[in-house]
Amino acid sequence: MSPLAARIHAALPQTQCARCGYPDCAAYASAIADEGAAINRCPPGGTEGVERLAGLVGQPPLPLDPACGAEAPRTLAVIDEAWCIGCTLCLDACPTDAIVGSNKFMHTVIEPYCTGCELCIPVCPVDCISLQNASGERTGWAAWSAADADQARERYALRTARRLRADDENRARLEAKARAHLADLPAHTHGATGAEAQRKRDVIEAALARARARRTPPTP
């Protein structure tokens, strides 16, 4: 992330709601700094948020882009526990791990960690999640604080790191199984010719190479 992108990132509310059209606040900050993306695409930051970004990039403030949503009070996700089926889809969707529960067991929201991102709403198959006004008439940064943003940014970073570790561990397990299969291949070809056995080896080696490529970040 460039220095300007880092300053922009620090000025965003960190709700990680993706209403801006980017996957997270960091991606939006980089798009503004490096690609000239519009500074008026963050409804949670509201008018004050646009003004903060305008000051950082040296542009005049713009009205919020209505395509991204409107400035509104902060919301809190609430799960109707009587209808929750424990599918865990909302756990996967929550960017700050603000929902706890396990498969086939009731889920609940940890209120201080919920950013009101709304990402849990569309994934719930039984529509048991609703949004409640958590800030009264206060909107934008008046309904949010620097401490809230810092907490959300930290929790999102921890969640992202955990998921990356889990992905790496899963790929490593699959790679180990593929290597074990590759080592045992001659004993299981059941009369296959040397050329056929080599073809199978080549297929597995190619799959391993693709897995290693996915695990290696691209060079800047």
Image: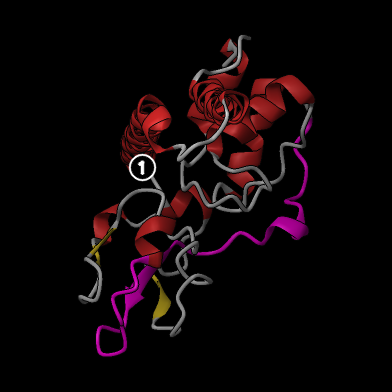
User: In which image quadrant can residue 94 be found?
Assistant: bottom left
Looking at the picture, tell me which residue is in the foreground, 12 or 101: 101
Farthest-out residue, bottom: 82
Looking at the picture, tell me which residue is in the foreground, 175 or 200: 200
Location of the C terminus (image quadrant)? top right
User: In which image quadrant can residue 175 be found?
Assistant: top left
Q: Which residues are magenta?
A: 60-88
Instruction: Residue 43: say if magenta.
Output: no
Instruction: Residue 63: say if magenta.
Output: yes
Query: Disc 1 marks which amino acid?
Result: Ala
Looking at the picture, tell me which residue is in the foreground, 202 or 212: 202
Farthest-out residue, front: 191
What x and y, as percent, mark residue 199? 61, 28
Q: Residue at x 34, y 73 (%)?
A: 87
Query: Pointer 1: residues within 10 angstroms few (<14), some, or many (20+)?
Result: many
Looking at the picture, tell me which residue is in the foreground, 193 or 13: 193
What x and y, as percent, mark residue 33? 69, 22
Q: Residue at x 46, y 80 (%)?
A: 125
**For this view, does 62 lie left or right of residue 45?**
right
What x and y, as percent, mark residue 5? 60, 20
Q: Secondary structure under badge 1? A: helix
Residue position marked by numbered label 1 in the rendering: 152
Measured along the vertical axis of the image, is residue 91 above or below residue 121?
above
